[in-house]
Image (tube, rainbow, N blue to C red):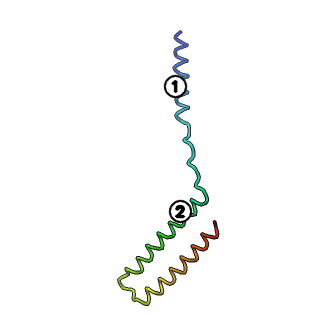
């Protein structure tokens, strides 16, 4: 009887230990459209922050700001085109 009790407790302990070591399920992978949308949102956010930094620069002249904004807009358009073509 004593051996049965010990083996039962040992078996229960091992089963709980094995159950506790189970790995959690893997998180679901985002779909292609979700991934593209998140990349587009990141791109828009980065564009807005860079534009704000250029516009609020204390030393840059109006001409310098216009040139930087033109370059930023061109780069932004190219990245948007690449993102759309990847869809």
Marks 1 and 2: CB-CB under 8 Å? no
Q: Nearer the viewer, residue 19 or 63?
A: 63
Looking at the rendered image, the quarter that the C terminus falls into is bottom right
Residue 25 is situated, as x and y percent measured from the top left of the image, at: 56, 43
Residue 65 is situated, as x and y percent measured from the top left of the image, at: 43, 85
Left/right placement of residue 32 relative to residue 53 reads right
Q: CA distance from mark 1 to mark 2?
A: 46 Å
The residue under label 2 is: 38
Q: Nearer the viewer, residue 43 or 11?
A: 43
Residue 6 is situated, as x and y percent measured from the top left of the image, at: 52, 16
Q: Nearer the viewer, residue 49 or 37?
A: 37
The residue under label 1 is: 13
Counting every numbered tag in the picture gives 2
Left/right placement of residue 62 relative to residue 75 reads left
Q: Quadrant of residue 52?
A: bottom left
Name the residue located 56 percent from the left edge and 40 percent from the top edge: 23
Q: Nearer the viewer, mark 1 or mark 2?
A: 2
Q: Nearer the viewer, residue 26 or 12?
A: 26
Name the residue located 54 percent from the left edge and 27 percent from the top edge: 14
Seen as rendered, the residue at the extreme bottom is 63
Q: Quadrant of residue 54?
A: bottom left
Determine the secondary structure under disc 1.
Answer: helix
């Amino acid at each position: 009887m004593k051996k049965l009790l010990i083996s039962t407790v040992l078996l229960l302990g091992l089963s709980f230990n094995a159950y506790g070591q189970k790995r959690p399920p893997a998180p679901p992978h985002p779909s292609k459209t979700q991934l593209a949308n998140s990349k587009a949102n990141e791109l828009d956010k980065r564009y807005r922050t860079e534009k704000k930094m250029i516009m609020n620069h204390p030393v840059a002249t109006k001409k310098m700001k216009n040139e930087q904004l033109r370059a930023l807009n061109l780069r932004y358009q190219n990245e948007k085109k690449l993102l759309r073509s990847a869809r």
